[in-house]
Image (cartoon, grey):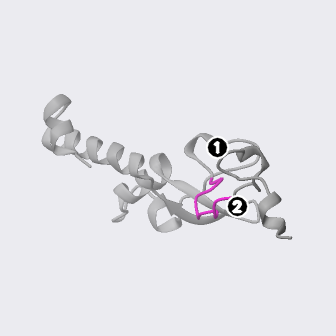
């Protein structure tokens, strides 16, 4: 007797199939966002080399960290690793194209393509 012939077919009865394995977690799963900043549980700290207003500070990096990035977590705490999503990169690119070239609307969108 072959017991496999009595097992439900997952195609014809998917509710009887074992649940799919969860997707592996990535570095930005559950990351802190800009909207989490200044809440009681999270305060984004910009690294010191980008935090000042003068003295050769990289203002683009400060803006990326402050306004566009996600900050990773380690054991539920911020780990000071900052990441940009594809949507954030597009937003930054549109802002730069607008501020440096003055291109907005269709012209700016045409320049900023995937």
Residue at the far bottom: name it. Answer: 1
**SS at mark 1 in the image:** helix
**Residue 78 is covered by the magenta coloring:** no
Task: From the viewer's perspective, tell me whether residue 18 is left or right of residue 66.
Answer: right
> Which residue is tagged 2?
21
- In the rendered view of the protein, which quadrant contains the N terminus? bottom right
Circle 2 — which element?
Answer: loop
Does the magenta segment cover residue 28? yes
The residues bearing labels 1 and 2 have C-alpha atoms spaced at a distance of 30 Å
Residue 112 in picture, x, y percent from top left: 22, 45
Numbered mark located on residue 36 in the image: 1
Q: Would you say the residues marked 1 and 2 are in contact, meaning their CB atoms lie under 8 Å apart?
A: no
The total number of labels drawn is: 2
Give the magenta range: 22-31
Side of 15 relative to 67 (left or right) = right
Please report the residue visible at 42 percent of the width from the left and 53 percent of the height from the top.
64
In depth, the one of 25 and 4 nearer the eye is 4
Nearest to the observer: residue 89 or residue 68 = 89
The residue closer to the viewer here, 78 or 47, is 78
Q: Residues within 10 Å of mark 1 (few under 14, many from 20)?
A: some
Residue 37 x, y percent position in the rendering: 62, 45
Earlier along the polypeptide chain: callout 1 or callout 2? 2
């Amino acid at each position: 007797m072959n017991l496999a012939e009595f097992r439900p077919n997952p195609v014809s009865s998917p509710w009887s199939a074992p649940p799919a394995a969860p997707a592996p977690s990535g570095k930005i799963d559950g990351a802190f966002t800009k909207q989490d900043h200044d809440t009681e549980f999270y305060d984004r700290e910009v690294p010191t080399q980008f935090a000042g207003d003068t003295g050769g500070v990289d203002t683009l990096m400060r803006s990326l960290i402050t306004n566009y990035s996600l900050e990773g977590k380690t054991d539920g705490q911020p780990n000071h690793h900052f990441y940009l999503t594809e949507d954030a990169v597009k937003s930054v690119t549109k802002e730069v194209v607008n501020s440096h070239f003055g291109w907005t609307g269709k012209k700016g969108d045409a320049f900023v393509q995937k």
